[in-house]
Image: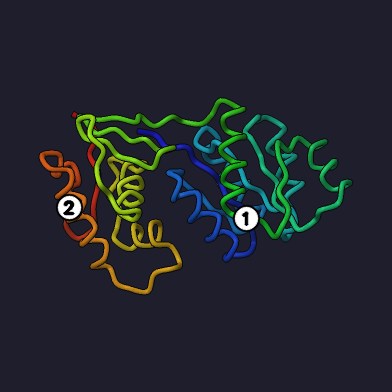
Amino acid sequence: MKRTTVLVVDDEERIRKLVGDFLRNRGFAVEEAVDGKEAWKVFLDHPEKIDLVILDVMMPPPDGWAVLKLIRENHRTPVLMLTAKAGEYDQLEGFALGADDYVTKPFSPGLLVARVEALLRRSGTRKETPTEFDGVRVDEPGHTIFLDGKRLDLTPKEYDLFLYLFENAGIALTRERLLSAVWNYDFYGDLRTVDTHVKQLRAKLGTRAERIRTIRGVGYSLEVDP
């Protein structure tokens, strides 16, 4: 299944990693660029692949405004401007140039991702992920997984791990990526934690346990196709 792809453009590596991790944790694919020149190249190489651009304003030339102008010459891809400038004039300039939304630094990563999802829904470009396969149903608003109509008794981390696997179905995910996405920055253990939680998930999935495949030398993948 094709995932929604967001291009994150910021000359600060810390910002790119923070935003990228939150987006990946919500099931998005993420492309990154360190400046305006690289951003335009990434976008121009595959404009049909990029569903939304998060674009920092204050970068080495060409800055965010210049890249926004280039994008708007021939494309209607949603663009969310990210900048430290909070003045009304700056925001009005951004909207006048064709920006779709505007978030100022410092920002809440969770709120930023919510703005991204809302913007994609309005533009009709958010790819919807199926919520059920082989008797397994994901109730994301209720943070619940059902198996053959019965609610699975999952811990919060087991749920988060299953959801991330589900949102990235068919993709081989490394233990490192799973650890970063599910446990984020609050965890100081090792990669065996991922294996332990996968084992627990498989036990609770019963006859569907084989849907979580071990990819030798890599990690795990959830298979949702028949």
Q: Amino acid type of disc 2? A: Thr
| Residue at x 65%, y 29% (from the top left corner) | 76
Q: Which residue is at the far top?
A: 124
Q: Amino acid type of disc 1? A: Ser
Nearer the N terminus, badge 2 or badge 1? 1
For this rendering, which residue is in front, 49 or 146? 146
Q: Which residue is at the far bottom?
A: 188
> Left or right: 160 with respect to 62?
left
Residue 46 point in image, percent of width and height: 52, 38
| Residue at x 38%, y 42% (from the top left corner) | 143
Q: Is residue 62 visible?
A: no
| Residue at x 70%, y 36% (from the top left corner) | 100
Q: How many marks?
A: 2
Q: Quadrant of the N terminus?
A: top left
**As displayed, is residue 206 above or below residue 198?**
above
Frontmost of labels 2 and 1 is 1
Q: Which residue is identified by label 1?
A: 108
Quarter of the image for residue 18 reads bottom right
Q: Residues within 10 Å of mark 2 (few under 14, many from 20)?
A: some
What label sits on residue 56 in the rendered view?
none
For this rendering, which residue is in front, 90 or 7? 90
Q: Is residue 206 visible?
A: yes
- CA distance for labels 2 and 1: 35 Å
- Name the element at disc 2: strand
**As displayed, is residue 210 above or below residue 48?**
below
Q: Which residue is identified by label 2?
A: 214
Residue 183 point in image, percent of width and height: 39, 62
For this rendering, which residue is in front, 40 or 166? 166
Q: Quadrant of the C terminus?
A: top left
> Left or right: 210 with respect to 69?
left
Residue 6 point in image, percent of width and height: 53, 43
- Name the element at disc 1: loop
